[in-house]
C-alpha cells in the first residue's frame, strides 16, 4: 500500500472511530500496553495497517486493533495509577519509551479532521465556547497588532519632527527608515534646532554609522555644535584615537595635537609618558602654527628627565644636611615645574649651576615668569627657616649667580635700614608677602624690611601694629616726624630692647614736626 493510500485509508470517517478524539485532550495521557512485536515486520513484507474495526481483546497478535492496546487516563486517574503497583515500571520503561514516541508521532499524522474542529472557537458559538480558544484568539490579535506597529516603526518614514519628539520624550523610535542623505541631514538639523543633547547625539551617531567618513566629516564641518557634542561624547568614552583622527579631518591640527598630548600623559610610568610625548611630537606637532606648543612639550620631556635624575641622586645622598634635617615627603618625579623649583630651593639652594638640582640652573633651563619665580623661591626658603632679603630676590630677576648673591638672612639680622628696591616691589604685592613671611615664622626685623616697601603709610602702620613689628612702627613714625606718636608707642616697647634704644636715639637726633 502506498503512502497516499495509507493516509486516505486512515483519514476516512468510516475507518477513524470517534473515540480517537479523546486521544488529543490536553488533560489526558495516552499509553501503550500492547506487544512490541507488532512493530517488527519481516524483511521484504510491507507493513500492514492495523484493523481498527475489531480484534482480539488484550492480545498482542497482529489481528487485534491498535486502539485496544492504547489506554487513556485523565488527570483524575493519576491517583489510581500511583496507588497501583509499579514493579514493572522500571523493567519496561526502556522498551515502552521508544514505542511511545513512535506511537505519538504516528497518531499526530493520523489525526482526523474532527480533532482540529475542537480548537476552532467558532464551533462553540451558540452553545458552549472554548475558553482556551478564545484566549488564544485574543493573544493572536494582540501579537498581530504588535507586529503591525513594529513594521510601521521600522519601515515607515515619519516626519523628522515626530521622530525627534519621540527621542526627547523617551518614546520608542527608529532611525533606520531614514535612508537617503537628505533625510538624515534633515533629521540632524531638526535635532539641532531643539538644542537637546540626546536627540542631537542620536542623529549624529546614526549619520556616522550610515555614511562614508568623508561625507560625515564634510557635513559635520558646517555644524560646529554637533561637532562639539560628538567630541565630548568621544572624550567621555576615552576614544581618544578616534577623536584625534576626527579633529585632523576637520582641519583642526591644534586641537588634535593638544588631545594627543593629553593621551600621552595617561601613561602609567615616566618612561612611558616620555615615549608617548615623543611620538606625539613626531605625528601631531609638526604644523608650523604649533611651534610654541611643541617647545612646551619638549620642555616637559626635559623636566621629567631632570626630575628622574634628581630623585635618583637624592635617594642615595646621605651627606646633604638639608635632606637629613627635612626628610623628603615624596618623590619629585612627575611634579610640576614650580613644585620642582620649590624642592630645589629647599634642598639644593647653594648648589652650583652645573648641578641638576640647582635652582638657578632650573630657572635658566625653563621659562618661568618673574612673579611665579619669586613666590616659589620665597616660600621654598621660608619652608626651611631661611628668609631672603628683597635685594637677594632682586638678583633672581637679573639672573645673577646664587653664590655670593643669595645668602642667609642671619647675617643681615643686625641691620634695620630700609633697602631700596624696585624689582620685587613691582612684581609681588608686599602686603601678601608680609602675611606669608609672618605665617612662616619670620622674625620682626625681616618683616620690617618688607613692610618698608609698602607705599601706603597707613597700610605700613596697620601691618606693623597688627604683626607687632616694633621696628616697622618706629620707622613709620620717624618718616612722618611724629614725635608724640613715637613717645606714646615707646611705652609698649620693652625698655632696653634694640627697638627701644633706636627710638630713644631718634628722639634726640631727628627733626620733628611737634
Image: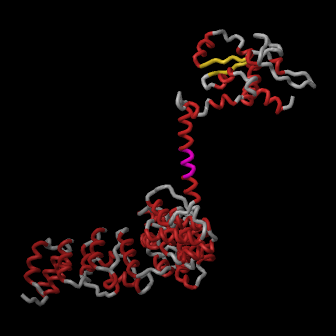
Is residue 314 visible in the rendered image? The answer is no
In the rendered view, does 458 fall on the left or right side of 52?
left
Give the residues drawn in magenta, as a range: 142-148
Q: Relative to the observer, which residue lies in front, 406 or 494?
A: 406
- Residue 315 in the image: above or below residue 290: above
Measuring from the top left, give residue 218's x and y in whole percent. Answer: 58, 77
Q: Main secondary structure of the magenta part?
A: helix
State the quadrant of the C terminus.
Answer: bottom left
In the rendered view, does 320 fall on the left or right side of 511?
right
Q: Residue at x 83, y 30 (%)?
A: 5
Measuring from the top left, give residue 52's x and y in whole percent. Answer: 77, 19
- Residue 13 in the image: above or below residue 313: above
Q: Residue at x 24, y 79 (%)?
A: 451
- Rendering quarter of residue 285: bottom right
- Rendering quarter of residue 103: top right
Measuring from the top left, give residue 438's x and y in whole percent. Answer: 27, 70
State the quadrant of the N terminus.
Answer: top right
In the rendered view, does 503 fall on the left or right side of 34?
left
Let me know if residue 402 is in the magenta part: no
Q: Relative to the observer, which residue lies in front, 407 or 36?
A: 36
In the rendered view, does 232 fall on the left or right side of 514?
right
In this view, the residue farthest toward the right is 44
Amino acid at each position: 500500500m502506498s503512502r497516499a493510500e495509507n493516509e486516505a485509508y486512515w483519514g476516512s470517517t468510516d475507518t477513524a472511530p470517534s473515540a480517537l478524539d479523546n486521544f488529543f485532550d490536553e488533560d489526558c495521557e495516552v499509553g501503550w500496553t500492547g506487544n512490541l512485536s507488532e512493530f517488527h515486520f519481516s524483511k521484504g513484507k510491507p507493513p500492514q495497517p492495523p484493523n481498527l474495526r475489531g480484534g482480539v481483546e488484550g492480545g498482542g497478535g497482529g489481528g487485534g486493533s491498535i486502539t485496544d492496546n492504547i489506554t487513556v487516563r485523565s488527570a483524575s486517574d493519576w491517583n489510581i495509577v500511583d496507588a497501583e503497583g509499579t514493579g514493572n515500571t522500571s523493567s519496561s520503561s526502556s522498551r515502552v519509551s521508544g514505542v511511545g514516541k513512535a506511537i505519538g508521532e504516528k497518531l499526530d499524522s493520523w489525526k482526523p479532521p474532527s480533532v482540529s474542529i475542537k480548537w476552532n472557537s467558532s464551533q462553540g458559538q451558540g452553545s458552549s465556547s472554548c475558553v482556551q480558544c478564545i484566549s488564544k484568539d485574543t493573544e493572536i490579535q494582540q501579537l498581530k497588532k504588535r507586529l503591525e506597529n513594529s513594521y510601521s516603526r521600522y519601515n515607515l518614514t515619519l516626519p523628522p519632527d515626530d521622530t525627534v519628539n519621540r527621542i526627547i520624550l523617551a518614546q520608542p523610535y527608529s532611525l533606520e527608515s531614514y535612508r537617503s542623505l537628505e533625510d538624515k541631514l534633515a533629521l540632524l538639523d531638526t535635532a539641532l534646532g531643539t538644542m537637546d543633547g540626546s536627540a542631537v547625539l542620536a542623529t549624529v551617531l546614526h549619520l556616522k554609522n550610515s555614511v562614508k567618513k568623508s561625507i560625515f566629516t564634510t557635513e559635520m564641518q558646517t555644524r560646529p555644535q554637533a561637532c562639539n557634542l560628538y567630541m565630548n561624547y568621544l572624550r567621555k568614552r576615552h576614544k581618544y584615537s578616534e577623536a584625534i583622527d576626527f579633529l585632523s579631518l576637520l582641519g583642526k591640527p591644534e586641537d588634535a595635537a593638544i588631545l594627543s598630548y593629553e593621551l600621552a600623559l595617561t601613561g602609567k610610568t615616566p618612561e612611558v609618558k616620555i615615549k608617548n610625548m615623543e611620538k606625539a611630537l613626531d605625528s601631531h606637532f609638526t604644523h608650523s602654527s604649533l611651534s610654541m606648543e611643541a617647545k612646551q612639550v619638549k620642555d616637559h620631556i626635559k623636566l621629567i628627565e631632570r626630575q628622574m635624575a634628581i630623585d635618583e641622586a637624592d635617594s642615595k645622598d646621605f651627606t646633604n644636611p638639608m635632606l637629613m634635617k627635612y626628610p623628603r615627603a615624596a618623590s619629585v618625579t612627575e611634579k610640576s615645574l614650580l613644585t620642582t623649583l620649590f624642592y630645589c630651593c629647599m634642598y639644593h639652594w647653594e648648589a652650583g649651576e652645573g648641578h641638576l638640582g640647582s635652582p638657578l640652573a632650573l630657572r635658566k633651563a625653563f621659562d618661568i615668569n618673574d612673579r611665579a619665580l619669586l613666590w616659589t623661591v620665597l616660600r621654598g626658603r621660608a619652608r626651611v627657616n631661611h628668609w631672603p632679603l628683597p635685594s637677594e630676590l632682586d638678583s633672581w630677576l637679573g639672573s645673577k649667580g646664587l653664590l655670593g648673591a643669595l645668602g642667609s638672612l642671619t647675617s643681615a639680622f643686625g641691620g634695620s635700614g630700609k633697602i631700596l628696591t624696585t624689582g620685587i616691589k613691582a612684581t609681588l604685592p608686599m602686603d601678601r608677602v608680609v602675611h606669608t613671611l609672618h605665617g612662616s615664622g619670620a622674625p620682626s626685623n625681616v618683616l620690617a624690611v618688607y613692610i618698608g616697601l609698602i607705599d601706603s603709610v597707613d597700610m605700613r602702620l596697620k601691618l606693623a601694629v597688627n604683626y607687632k613689628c616694633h621696628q616697622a612702627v618706629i620707622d613709620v613714625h620717624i618718616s612722618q616726624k611724629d614725635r608724640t606718636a613715637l613717645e606714646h608707642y615707646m611705652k609698649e616697647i620693652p625698655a632696653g630692647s634694640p627697638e627701644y634704644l633706636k627710638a630713644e636715639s631718634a628722639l634726640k637726633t631727628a627733626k620733628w614736626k611737634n
